[in-house]
Amino acid sequence: MEMLELIKSRRSPRGFFDKSVSEEDLMKMFDAARWAASSYNGQPWRFIYADKEKNPELYETLLNIMVEFNQAWAKAAPILMLTLARVKYEHNEEDYKHAWHDLGLAMGNMAIMGESLGISMHIMGGFDADKAKKDLNIPEKLEPVTMVAVGYGGMPGNLPLDIYKMEQVPRVRKEIEEIAFNKAFE
């Protein structure tokens, strides 16, 4: 598939098929993430993930740090993940002001790799970062950033009705002229 078409085909579903993601495919996605660009090559991204079948205790811990709305649909995903960013550079321990940006680049790589494998990701901000820090014993140098549901997108019919209706809304993007400018703001 042409790269732009692959990017355009990416979705963030809330419905997932009851199908496992192979360890091999998951590692391809992490490999894509690790090749993202980063400030000073700091590679601040870290991931805590759990397969529902292979690591149900950690899966439940991850599920329980999400807000109730996200728990309602994310529990169908075979993989749950917490993304974290290192908040200090490793080479000098100064503040890593671009860590979230760099994590975002890694997540973009991961999402496109997943899409190429038929695997969807739904990245969300609805979770309790303090609970994550406590329940997962996260060190001070790492900051929880997002939760991610990973799996084979589809099956919107198994969602609660209010969430199902959200899945039916057409996908819209701003026009290029609304986001890219070749002059200063007036």
Image (tube, helix red, strand yellow):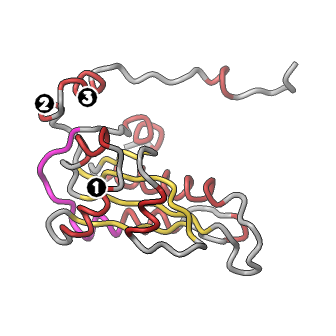
Residue 26 lies within the magenta run: yes
Q: Amino acid at mark 3?
A: Ile
The secondary structure that dominates the magenta segment is: loop
Q: Earlier in the sequence, mark 1 or mark 3?
A: 1
Residue 172 falls left or right of residue 74 = right
Q: Which residues are magenta?
A: 15-27
Q: Choose top left, top right, bottom left or bottom right for residue 20.
A: bottom left
Residue receiving disc 2: 157
Q: Amino acid at mark 2?
A: Gly
Describe the element under mark 2 as helix, strand or loop. helix
Q: Amino acid at mark 1?
A: Leu
Q: CA separation, marks 1 and 2? A: 21 Å
If the image is split into quadrants, where does the C terminus sit? top right
Residue receiving disc 3: 163
Q: Nearer the viewer, mark 2 or mark 3?
A: 3
Q: Is residue 2 above or below residue 32?
A: above
Q: Nearer the viewer, mark 1 or mark 2?
A: 1
Q: Choose top left, top right, bottom left or bottom right for residue 105.
A: bottom right
Describe the element under mark 3 as helix, strand or loop. helix
Residue at coordinates 45% horizontally, 22% vertically from top-left? 172
Q: CA separation, marks 1 and 3? A: 17 Å
Question: Where residue 157 appears, x then y in whole percent?
Answer: 13, 30
Badge 1: residue crowd in 10 Å (few <14, some 14–19, many ≥20)? many
Query: For residue 137, which numbered disc appears in the image?
Result: none
